[in-house]
Amino acid sequence: MTATEAHLARTYDDFDRILDQAAYDPLPEDWLIGVTDVVNSTAAIRRGAYEDVNFVGVSVIAALGAELGDYSFPFAFAGDGTSFAVPQDRRAQAASVLRQVIVLARNDFDLELRGGLVPVRDIRANGHDVKIARYAASEHAVYAMFAGGGRKWAEAEVKRGRYAITPDDDVSRPDLSGLSCEWRPIPNRHGLILSLLAEPLEAKGRETFAQLARRVLEIFREDQRQGHPLPLTMPTAKHDKQLDADKWLEVAANSDFRKYDDILRLTLDCSAAQADRAEEILRDASSQGQIRYGAHRQTHALMTCFVPSSDLKGHLHFLDGADGGYATAADNMSRISLTK
């Protein structure tokens, strides 16, 4: 077990278990939560740069794994940003990578990336927690899930300017070996691609939220693939890339179309009727003060891929909507909250 895997070994292959708070283990006090987000990602999306936004978000994961020498540290991709956790003794490496990617985002993509490192000790001192579980999307692809409210608190603190990592122009380029965006936007098969966010309100209890989330997920189980946005046959790639049938099925199996990082995040291929039913459940729960939610509908999904050289079978594929995705759903979530 590597240094970044310590205390974080529990893994589940049933996504419903991820919704149970009992599935999560607390991070050690001396760990750090790293968070990044693209500032004003809405404007970047409007100018057609959402593929760049996604690429920058995943860059943090790829570069940090290369710097640490392994990719077992917990991380979660959220469209226009990333969260991760590392031990305190890896702080200098994590800060260096954040500086590298912040400069990369500005110089190569004309994007302002904000990043920070927040001690778990400070998170707990402010009444929140950070707990981790691991979800095995397939035999070789395992994604971390975050619970406890602390990741969200850390993100808010960094946005306020606390714990921020200041960029330094005199940095090397990050090692992004294995990171690519080789696939054209992937069209829906059932009517639309739905980006869906749902967040429990702590005062109402997280078990209530788990039951609600299962009701939403059950809608998409009407389809054998449960709303998975990647088809069983290979879609159109850039540069005439070709994969055999078995390799493409591995790509689909190793993707992250469902995740939880204090917020349930879903990228789903579904019908308009299914999307309506899901949003009706969430709208009712929101009106009762149980949750916040945001949704965005588009025609295509977007995939950013990472193939670590240390474990070629452990390739990971990060999914989002191709026309705003999670970032626009989050913006819609904020608008709903402001009107309540």
Image: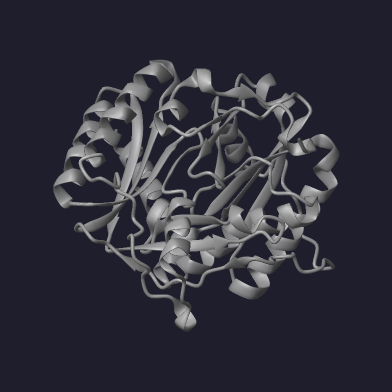
Q: Residue at x 69, y 67 (%)?
A: 177
**Residue 110 versus residue 144 in the image, above or below:** below
Q: Residue at x 46, y 29 (%)?
A: 18
- Tell which of 312 and 123 is nearer to you: 312
Residue 291 found in image quarter: top left
Task: Please give left or right for residue 25 compared with residue 15 in the image.
Answer: right
Q: Position of residue 45 (x, y in %)?
A: 43, 65
Q: Quadrant of the image for the N terminus?
A: top right
Task: Please give left or right for residue 115 compared with residue 208 in the image.
Answer: right
Task: Please give left or right for residue 332 compared with residue 140 in the image.
Answer: left
Q: Position of residue 145 (x, y in %)?
A: 54, 35
Q: In the rendered image, is residue 3 in sight?
A: yes
Q: In the rendered image, is residue 129 in sight?
A: no
Q: Quadrant of the image for the C terminus?
A: top left
Which colouring convention does the figure follow? one colour
Q: Position of residue 265 (x, y in %)?
A: 41, 42
**Residue 220 versus residue 127 in the image, above or below:** below
Q: Residue at x 44, y 62 (%)?
A: 246
Residue 85 found in image quarter: top right
- Tell which of 94 and 8 is nearer to you: 8
Q: Position of residue 159 (x, y in %)?
A: 60, 45
**Residue 276 versus residue 60 in the image, above or below:** above
How many badges with numbers are in the image?
0
- Tell which of 175 and 17 is nearer to you: 17
**Residue 59 versus residue 11 in the image, above or below:** below
Residue 236 found in image quarter: bottom left
Farthest-out residue, bottom? 239
- Tell which of 139 and 122 is nearer to you: 139
